[in-house]
Image (spheres, rainbow, N blue to C red):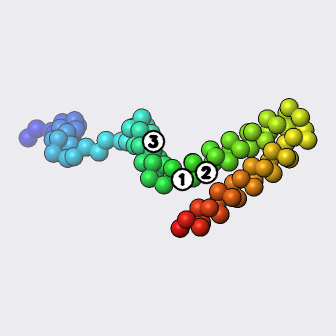
C-alpha cells in the first residue's frame, strides 16, 4: 500500500477549480467609468432645465456683482432692474400658457 501524497489535495482542488466559474473582482477604473456614465445620463435626462436656470441667475448675479465692484450704488439699481425684468418674463410666460 502506498501512502497518499500530502500534495494530493492540491491536485483535487485544482481540478475542482477548473470546473468552477471564476468571479472577477470589480476593477476601480471600470466602476468609475460606469458611475460617470450613469451620472452623465441622469444629467442629460433631468438637468437641462435646472442648469439653464442656474446659469441664467448666476449670470445675473455676476452682472450685479460686477456693478458692485465698479460703483457700489449702481448694484442695487441694476439688481432691481433685472428683478423687474425677470418677473415680467415670468408673468408673460404664465399668460401664454
The tag earlier along the polypeptide, 3 or 2, is: 3
- Tell me if residue 49 comes above or below residue 3 in the rendering: below
Residue at the limit of the structure toward the right, as seen here: 73
* Quarter location, residue 7: top left
Inspect this view and state whether residue 97 appears: yes
The tag earlier along the polypeptide, 1 or 3, is: 3
In the rendered structure, are the residues bearing label 3 and label 2 in contact, judged by CB atoms less than 8 Å apart?
no
Residue 41 spot, x, y in % from top left: 42, 48
Label 3 to label 2, Cα distance in Å?
23 Å
Q: Which residue is drawn at the image coordinates 74% and 44% (left, top)? A: 61
Question: Left or right: 45 with respect to 95?
Answer: left
Between disc 3 and disc 2, the foreground one is 2
Secondary structure state at the residue bearing disc 1: helix
> Where does label 2 land, which residue?
53
Residue at the limit of the structure toward the top, as seen here: 70
Label 1 to label 3, Cα distance in Å?
20 Å
Q: How crowded is mark 2: few (under 14 residues within 10 Å), some or many (20 or more)?
A: few
In the rendered structure, are the residues bearing label 1 and label 2 in contact, judged by CB atoms less than 8 Å apart?
yes
Residue 92 spot, x, y in % from top left: 62, 61
> Where does label 1 land, which residue?
49
Question: Looking at the image, which is closer to me, 11 or 32?
Answer: 32
Q: Which residue is drawn at the image coordinates 57% and 48% (left, top)? A: 52
Q: Which residue is drawn at the image coordinates 86% and 32% (left, top)? A: 70
Between disc 1 and disc 3, the foreground one is 1
Question: Left or right: 59 with respect to 11?
Answer: right
Residue 43 spot, x, y in % from top left: 48, 49
Amino acid at each position: 500500500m502506498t501512502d497518499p501524497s500530502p500534495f494530493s489535495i492540491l491536485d483535487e482542488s485544482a481540478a475542482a477549480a477548473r470546473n468552477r466559474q471564476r468571479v472577477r473582482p470589480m476593477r476601480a477604473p471600470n466602476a468609475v467609468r460606469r458611475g460617470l456614465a450613469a451620472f452623465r445620463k441622469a444629467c442629460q435626462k433631468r438637468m437641462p432645465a435646472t442648469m439653464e436656470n442656474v446659469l441664467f441667475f448666476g449670470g445675473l448675479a455676476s452682472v450685479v456683482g460686477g456693478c458692485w465692484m465698479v460703483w457700489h450704488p449702481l448694484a442695487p439699481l441694476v439688481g432691481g432692474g433685472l428683478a423687474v425684468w425677470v418677473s415680467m418674463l415670468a408673468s408673460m410666460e404664465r399668460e401664454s400658457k
